[in-house]
């Protein structure tokens, strides 16, 4: 497999941002483990190989994020490995997965689902009421960008009056992850400002804990260890960014795909139980995050290719989710497809009975801790919109182009018209 048989320009520029899938298919078919000749990054694009990469925590490390996530947020789960990651995640993860702190778990128990749904229903209802009388809106600007942050602020029991500050902080954090020194400086400054803002709230919850997420993080304990105040503030920064931006884009993509597939949209409108299937297929078909990078800690063998220690590997989520070896006709959005595992994402991948799980939330111990929150916001938020408005359609001449955002794959606006229900 020689690098010169694949033109690296196919992975660059506007054409790739608008439609990365043809180039990724070329890599899957011809060079499933390929090194960029100039940047030296390795690309892994087949489903089985990407799954293997996510799960090989000995050879592939997330410490590469120390130069971005930790630089902006402080100590971050995304940049930890080994015992440190296991200990911190063991303290934090029960807030999102398991039974220890059920109040924020939209999983099996009805009381958990009712609580998180209640947060989302409240926030979604307020947002819909803000635009329903106008009979038109940009669903991205007035809903999808606002719902995740508003729900997180409510879960943290922080003042509603400060929502606008959060809507400044989280995109500034996100921009600060880029290598641009000016954006990085602004991200670090915004995070410091946010931590100063959080300090009195964390100290108060340490003294007088309530039923909010900050209090639960203050009280959480594993093997006698608790999170430090700085740990808590850093995690809240990460939650605000990751839980805001990715969910924002997923909701926007869900609605864009449904509105551009009228028969499927009508099926969802008639049967709201299909929203979960639609969200799952959205995360397979048009996941906001295209891939994750890992640092190779020891020589990594894949398909007869040795990726040497010290290299950087891009595990292509888009490539894996569009692998024809796993998903038939992968470019087609089909909420009724019979090869996709619906209803829950798996930390270790899932292949059974001809169905596979998408990997839009990653896999393994760095599987997104907030995925249940993202799923609930997308599903419940969509249901609330469908209950409030009818005859929804994209405004004539305003159908956006998917992939207009170079940082994440998404639509950046979605102008709709509708009638009140």
Image: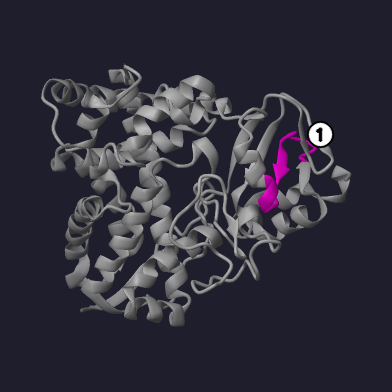
Which residue corresponds to the image point at 77% horizontal and 28% vertical from the top-left? 308
Which residue corresponds to the image point at 48% horizontal and 57% vertical from the top-left? 410
Location of residue 83 in the rendering, given as x and y in whole percent from the top left corner = 50, 20
Question: Crowdedness of circle 1 by 10 Å Cα count: few (<14), some, many (20+)?
Answer: few
Q: Return the residue at label 1.
A: 306
Which residue corresponds to the image point at 45% horizontal and 78% vertical from the top-left? 264
Does 31 appear above or below 333? above
Q: Which residues are magenta?
A: 35-49
Location of residue 245 in the rendering, given as x and y in whole percent from the top left corner = 40, 46
46 drawn magenta: yes
167 drawn magenta: no
Give the quadrant of the C terminus. Answer: bottom left
Give the side of residue 90 with respect to residue 308, left or right. left
- Asked if residue 185 shows in the view, the reply is no
- Circle count: 1
Does 168 appear above or below 254? above
Q: Nearer the viewer, residue 110 or 31?
A: 110
Determine which quarter of the picture holds residue 30. Answer: bottom right
Location of residue 194 in the rendering, given as x and y in whole percent from the top left corner = 28, 28
Location of residue 86 in the rendering, given as x and y in whole percent from the top left corner = 46, 26
Residue at the limit of the structure toward the left, as seen here? 208
Give the side of residue 176 with respect to residue 59, left or right. left
């Amino acid at each position: 497999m020689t690098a010169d048989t694949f033109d690296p320009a196919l992975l660059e520029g506007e054409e790739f941002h608008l439609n990365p899938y043809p180039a990724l298919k070329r890599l899957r078919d011809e060079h499933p483990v390929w090194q960029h000749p100039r940047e030296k990054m390795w690309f892994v694009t087949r489903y089985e190989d990407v799954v293997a990469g996510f799960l090989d925590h000995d050879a592939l490390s997330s410490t590469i994020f120390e130069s971005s996530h930790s630089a902006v947020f402080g100590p971050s789960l995304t940049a930890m490995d080994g015992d440190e990651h296991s200990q911190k995640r063991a303290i934090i993860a029960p807030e999102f997965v398991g039974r220890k702190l059920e109040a924020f778990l939209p999983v099996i128990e009805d009381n958990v689902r009712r609580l998180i749904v209640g947060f989302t229903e409240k926030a979604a209802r307020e947002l819909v009421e803000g635009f329903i009388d106008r009979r038109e809106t940009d669903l991205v600007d007035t809903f999808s960008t606002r719902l995740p942050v508003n729900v997180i602020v409510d879960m943290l029991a922080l003042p509603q009056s400060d929502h606008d500050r959060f809507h400044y902080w989280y995109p500034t954090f996100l921009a600060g992850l880029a290598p641009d020194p000016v954006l990085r400086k602004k991200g670090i400054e915004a995070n410091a400002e946010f931590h100063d803002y959080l300090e009195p709230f964390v100290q108060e919850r340490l003294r007088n804990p309530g039923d909010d997420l900050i209090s639960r993080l203050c009280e959480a304990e594993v093997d006698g260890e608790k999170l430090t105040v700085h740990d808590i503030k850093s995690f809240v920064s990460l939650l605000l960014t990751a839980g805001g931006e990715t969910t924002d884009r997923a909701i926007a993509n869900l609605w864009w795909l449904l509105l551009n597939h009228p028969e499927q949209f009508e099926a969802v409108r008639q049967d709201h139980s299909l929203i979960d299937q639609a969200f799952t297929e959205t995360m397979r078909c048009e996941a906001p995050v295209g891939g994750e990078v890992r640092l190779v800690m020891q020589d990594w063998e894949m398909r007869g290719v040795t990726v040497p220690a010290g290299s950087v590997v891009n595990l292509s989520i888009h490539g894996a989710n569009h692998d024809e070896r796993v998903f038939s006709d992968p470019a087609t959005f089909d909420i009724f497809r019979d090869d996709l595992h619906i209803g829950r994402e798996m930390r270790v991948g899932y292949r059974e009975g001809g169905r596979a799980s998408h990997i839009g939330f990653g896999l393994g111990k760095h599987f997104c801790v907030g995925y249940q929150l993202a799923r609930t916001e997308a599903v419940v938020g969509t249901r609330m919109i469908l209950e409030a408005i009818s005859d929804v359609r994209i405004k004539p001449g305003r159908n956006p182009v998917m992939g207009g955002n170079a940082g994440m794959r998404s639509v950046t606006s979605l102008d709709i018209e509708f009638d009140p229900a």
